[in-house]
Amino acid sequence: MRGRAKVSRDPFVSSEVETPYRAKPRSRASASVGGVPRLRLGRTVLGLGVALFAAAASAQTPRPATPPAGMQWLYGSGEGGASGIQAYHAFRNYVVAAARHRPRQSVVLAPGSTLAAPRFLPCGRRPLAVVLDVDETALQNLGYEYDDAIHPGRTYDQERWNRWEETGANAVLPTPGAVSALNAIRRARVTVIFNSNRLSRFAAQNTATIDGAGLGPVEHGRTLWLQGDVAAGSAKDPRRTAISERYCVIAMAGDQLGDFSDLFNARDLPVPERRRAAITEPFAWLWGNGWFILPNPVYGSGLRGGIDDVFPADRRWPAPERGNN
Ligand SMILES: [Mg+2]
């Protein structure tokens, strides 16, 4: 299932996010056959059998003709491309205008805030900055999602994602509209900072990926903040707080509510209440006025909820039988 396949990048499932991949411990061979440890020989034969079976299955399983609907929309459709450009037009226009009058208040929530009573950090005399998420906000992970699309049903594997961070730099694209918007924001003397849940141990590779997509230049620890930089885990508030010690953040962009505040990722927050918090005041006003969200129908915290979560009880339409009215 697509949503489940990507939950490790979903901060709701932080136990998966925070659990590093561990290779299974190797058992020692207790005896040998012809100089080859017996257990190892058995594993070799078994491994060869599995590999041959996998190769045969792969040869017999045709590549799916179409990717999942969310990928068609986000990566392949004109509608998806236009939505990126529209978001980045709004982001750029807002930031350039805001930089002229220099806001006194940041759009980063102060520690101790709640969804019911948010407070925002004061700017003081700090230089201006914007903070963006990376994946499916500024960068589209075409290569990784292609690999997912041709292996339907495969579950998420943190180690595979790690390999993507290490080696995927040439298989990404910037989100339509992002490059020109970020360059215009830099020209307005506003620092562009990325706050990503990519891993700090791959900082060099992630820097190359972002720069290679035309979204940089970024510098790890100054304009690129990664998971592990401030604290372990996928929570982004600690990094937002650290960034805010140096900068006045006048706008943020992301594709998940957690790109704006970890308060939206509380485990006990039901789907309907989370939506209600996002679309009612005080947060409703922020969308397009400091907080800018990019659509992501492919994975993440928005792909949750059962029928009763999604459809309010008073907005259901049982189709009338023909001829009964
Ligand atoms: Mg993202």
Image (cartoon, rainbow, N blue to C red):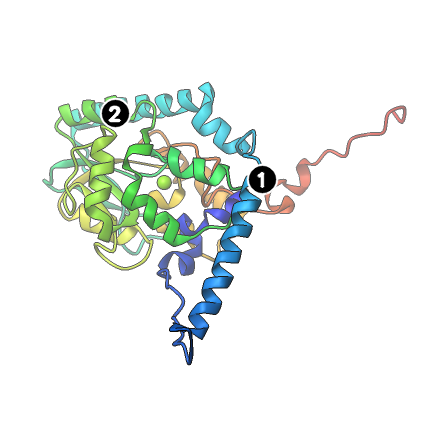
Mark number displayed over residue 61: 1
* Residue found at x 30% / y 56%: 112
* Residue plotted at (44% across, 39% down): 147
**Is disc 1 in contact with disc 2, using a CB cutoff of under 8 Å?**
no
Foreground mark, 1 or 2, reads: 1
Q: Quadrant of residue 34?
A: bottom left
Observer-nearest of 141 and 308: 141
- Give x and y (percent) for residue 161: 37, 48
The amino acid type of the residue labelled 1 equals Thr
Query: Which residue shows up at 78% across the image and 31% down it?
Result: 319
Dot 2: what SS?
helix
Image quarter in which the C terminus is found: top right
The residue at the far front in this view is 34
Q: Residue furthest right?
A: 323
Q: Is residue 168 left or right of residue 54?
A: left
> CA–CA distance between discs 1 and 2?
39 Å
- Residue 171 drawn at (x, y percent): 33, 33
Q: Which mark is residue 179?
A: 2
Locate residue 102, reporting x and y percent: 16, 31
Q: Position of residue 120 (x, y in %)?
A: 26, 45
- Looking at the image, is 324 positioned above or below residue 59? above
155 vs 162, left or right, is: right
- Residue furthest out toward the bottom: 30
Earlier sequence position, callout 1 versus callout 2? 1
Give the left or right position of residue 314, taking residue 236 as reference: right
**Which sits in the foreground, 215 or 63?**
63
**Secondary structure found at label 1:** loop
